[in-house]
Amino acid sequence: MPQIMLAHVTCPNCRNPFQTPVEQILDVRADPSAKMRVLNGLVNMAVCPHCGMRGALRIPFLYHDPDKELALVYMPVEAGRNDLERQQAIGKFTSTVMNSLPPEERKAYLLQPQVFLTLENLTNKILEADGVTPEMIEEQKARVELLQRMLDATSDEALEAIIRENDASIDADFFRLLTMNVEIAQATGRATDVQRFLALRDKLLELSSEGQAARARREMLEALRAEPTRDKLLDLLIQASDERTRELLVTFGRPLIDYPFFQALTARIEAAPDAAERERLKALRKEILAIRDRLDEATRALYEARAALLRDLMLSDDPERLARRRFLELDDAFFNVLAANLEEARTAGDEQTVQALQSVWNMILRLTEEAIPPELRLFNRLMAAEDEAEIEKLLEANRDLVTDRLVRFMEETEANLREEGALESADHLALVMEKAKETVA
Ligand SMILES: [Zn+2]
């Protein structure tokens, strides 16, 4: 479970003291987001209530990944007055983790955590355990530097020159880095940064080779979404010039790829104007079949794995612990398997199995609810509220959660809902927001 305590800190900017919650133990199994936060330097972020200065506090923590047997301690130089204090702090971390584990998982690596003075070395260790090589880390660093240079560009012309000169380096990984930065900026409420990143992405989509290819791909997928027919899919597949695009088209158009689809393709092959085009279309048919089989195999394997997990959960002495450990696998596919099994047991009148499945279902819903931050949980309940009186009651009972941040989140969500055409939900949310604003004020 997250280990959170209040720390007394002095703002490095305005020198005023304030209190802020800090995390001391980050356990990837209990909190899968911990890894991303560490890798992105977002652990123990604090905002000074006096001057608004924002930054990551240089406070020791222990990073624990039981599946990889990693116990890493961040111990910045300023953390302890002397070696003894530092050793004591490390000992406290490890004993806390040890005590939280069942006996069979109290392993030796926990007694000798690796200690790092810098976050950079600690994150490199995490990446290394993921099979990320030093070369890959260097490449990523180069991408981060390139991204920074783009953001620092003083004019449109300067930016365009940087993009032209680095066209070969602007690849899918670079776009992923950019997307990750957008998501982090959104998650940490930095609206101006979000705007800057998005503006840069627009420029890159327009000017870089990779961006143009990505845009072409997106347009093809849009075209298929607008007109999801076998003929349209076939036209697009024939037009698509690269394999990546064709693979995406087959993935999204999978339900359309059936016997009539292949009949239509065969007709096109027969009607081809020349031998070269005929050969090209035949190769395309082979490629589509291969992609389809690969997809179906992956889907089948996924469903088999989820069915096995469901069996394990029903047989386990401690299903909740198992569910927590394999929380990431409790996805849509898992719920599909669960629902299908439930349906089958109901039809067969097998009351005992129905009950067992139902209790797995309820337990997972409870865990899912637990994993959601309290603000979001309140938000979900407000969205489900039947009437004004219930909204008011919920807001009143959860006053401390109704913050400016929550209201901002509601505003963004309302705009998104309207954009998507979910007007009823948007209107409901507008009503909630009106009442929430009264509560904040
Ligand atoms: Zn301050």
Image: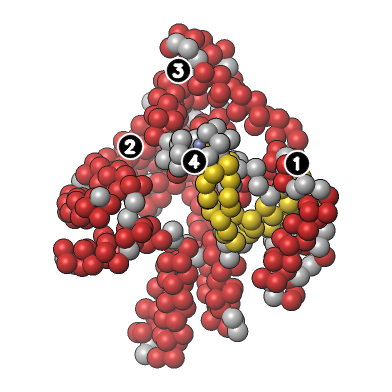
Question: How many other residues sit within 10 Å of disc 3, few (<14), some (14-19) or many (≥20)?
Answer: some
Counting residues from the N terminus, which is met first, the one under dot 4 or under dot 2? 4
Q: Secondary structure at mark 3?
A: helix
Mark 4: which amino acid? Cys
**Residue under the image location 52 percent in, 46 percent down:** 18
| Type of colouring | secondary structure
Query: Which residue is labeled 1 in the image?
Result: 77
Res. 157 visible in picture:
yes
Label 4: few (<14), some or many (≥20) within 10 Å? many
Q: Pick whichever of labels 4 and 3 is earlier in the sequence.
A: 4
Please state which of the two labelled residues, at mark 3 or mark 1, is closer to the viewer: 1
Report the amino acid beneath label 2: Glu
For marks 2 and 3, give the CA distance.
21 Å
Mark 2 or mark 1: name the one nearer the start of the chain.
1
Name the disc covering residue 222, or none. Answer: 2
Q: Which residue is mark 4?
A: 48
Question: Which of labels 4 and 2 is toward the front?
Answer: 4
Element at badge 2? helix
Mark positioned earlier in the residue sequence (4 or 1): 4
Disc 4 and disc 1 in contact, CB within 8 angstroms: no
